Amino acid sequence: MDTIHFQTRVPLKEVMRYKPTTVEYEATVARAAAIMCRDEVGSCIVLQNNLPRGIITEQDINCKVVAKDLKPGSVRVSEVMSTPLITIEAEKTVGDAAHMMVKHKVRRLPVVDGEKVVGIVTVRDLLTVATEINEIMSDLIEINRVDDMIMGVCDACGNMSDDLRPVDGTMLCTNCREEERLV
């Protein structure tokens, strides 16, 4: 449980991408697609008078324009963007962002300071952090290994042990290994 807490307390400012790709409210979908291609991203934050009003994603373009056989050069971004824009404050954490993404069923969150967009964080950004933390935890477990003994949490009882050993694919403490033998 502490590992999850450690992992999610990473400040969002550490993982977000600064200067996200934007497009003007009155731009065409063709213009937004060209900007996304140029920046090699899957979305543009839609700005009206420098204030965020929505987001247009590859999925919006595919489902709301291409699938309906509309001409991207004649459809305005404002007609197909996802709105209301779900944002997260810059001082929040990776855990906060993950919870918001799940709650709102979104894969991208513009990061704001007041009403100004200062960055964007995606599911991929969060997964990168999780992977890095998991690699660090694996290294920590490895350096605490003594022969076949490992320090950590027993898979069976959940207690901390300095003598974990693998039994049938699970890491068991001394007590749980004894119980396993008696069964």
Image (tube, rainbow, N blue to C red):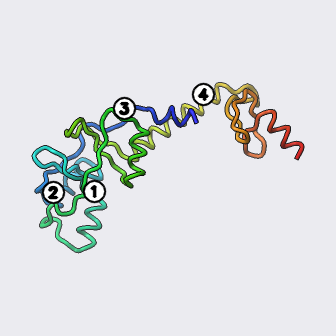
Residue mark closest to the camera, 2 vs 1: 1
Q: Image check: 29 left or right of 3?
A: left
Looking at the rendered structure, the kind of residue marked 1 is Thr
Q: Going by the image, does 1 lie left or right of 13?
A: right
Q: CA distance from mark 2 to mark 3?
A: 31 Å
Nearer-N-terminus badge (2/3): 3
Q: Amino acid at mark 3?
A: Glu
Give the residue at mark 3: 14
The residue drawn where x is 22% and y is 49% is 45
- Residue 63 coordinates in the image, percent (x, y): 29, 67
Badge 2, how many Cα within 10 Å: few under 14, some, many 20+?
some
Q: Is residue 54 above or below residue 7?
A: below
Residue 183: x %, y % from top left:
88, 47
Which label's residue is closer to the chain start, 2 or 1? 2
Q: Residues within 10 Å of mark 3 (few under 14, many from 20)?
A: few
Query: Depth check: 139 or 51 in front?
Result: 51
Please tell me which residue lies in front, 143 or 16. 16
Residue occupied by mark 4: 140
Sequence order check, earlier mark of 4 and 1: 1
Mark 4 surroundings within 10 Å by alpha-carbon count, few (fewer than 14), some (14 through 19), many (20 or more): few
Q: Residue 38, position in %: x, y? A: 22, 50
Give the secondary structure at mark 3. Answer: helix
Residue in the picture at 28% in, 65% down: 62
Circle number at residue 136: none
State how far apart marks 3 and 1 are (Cα). Answer: 24 Å
Q: Which residue is mark 2?
A: 31
Number of marks in the rendered image = 4
Which disc, if any, is residue 57?
1
Which amino acid type is shown beneath numbered disc 4?
Leu
Nearer-N-terminus badge (2/4): 2
Disc 2 to disc 4, C-alpha distance = 48 Å
Dot 3 or dot 1: first in sequence order is: 3
